[in-house]
Image: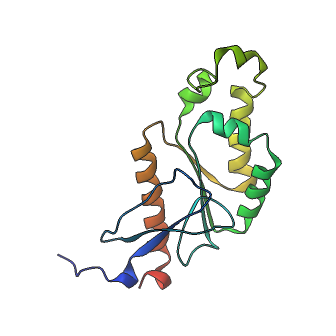
Amino acid sequence: MGLPMTDESRFTIIRDTREQTGWNWISSDRCTGTVVTKLDTGDYSIQGLEDRLCIERKKSVAEFATNITEKRFWKELERTRDYSYSFLICEFDMYDIDIYPEGSGIPRRMFPKIKVRRNFILSKLVEIQTKYNIFVNLCGSDVEIAKQITFSIMRNIWEGNAELST
């Protein structure tokens, strides 16, 4: 059995103040917990790595479909070019994209007015990965899986930056 982790070997997760229904992590052997503070880019990062790690979270295809039509979203993606590690965590999967706007909560009577469709969404996901070098994770609708994947990303980034985790 290894030695107990010290506070210096654990990381603190930052959740942006604008992430209103955001995730919180409690203290564990790897993490000191979550603090809420303003991040310039993204929804989550790690204290001490705010200028290197950016994690953006999208809760639904409908949210993503709206965002990809907004200049503000693309400006945020531009800022991620300065980060060593950028991730997009999506709480939906390919099936959700394929059937969109079905299952989105948008009233059926509005479907004919929706201009953003499957192929456009897919093309923007590819653009985000190739043009902005952002890792896209389609996590499905299980929030706990998306949260667990996000934590695993942060733990791996923290451990990969040994100068900060010792």
Percent coordinates x, y for residue 94 in the rendering: 56, 31
Residue 101 sits above or below residue 163 on the image: above
Q: Quadrant of residue 109?
A: top right
Residue 71 sits above or below residue 13 on the image: above
Residue at image coords 64%, 24%: 106
Residue 38 sits above or below residue 118 on the image: below
Q: Quadrant of residue 28?
A: bottom left
As drawn, is 123 to the left or to the right of 48? right
Residue at image coords 79%, 52%: 72
Q: Nearer the viewer, residue 127 or 45?
A: 45
Residue at image coords 49%, 82%: 164
Instruction: State the colouring used for the structure image.
Output: rainbow
- For the image, the number of numbered tags is 0
Residue at image coords 59%, 62%: 17
Q: Nearer the viewer, residue 17 or 116?
A: 17
As drawn, is 152 to the left or to the right of 133? left
Percent coordinates x, y for residue 96 in the rendering: 56, 28
**Image quadrant containing the N terminus:** bottom left
Q: Residue furthest right?
A: 71
Percent coordinates x, y for residue 147 in the rendering: 44, 51
Percent coordinates x, y for residue 104 in the rendering: 59, 27
**Image quadrant containing the C terminus:** bottom left
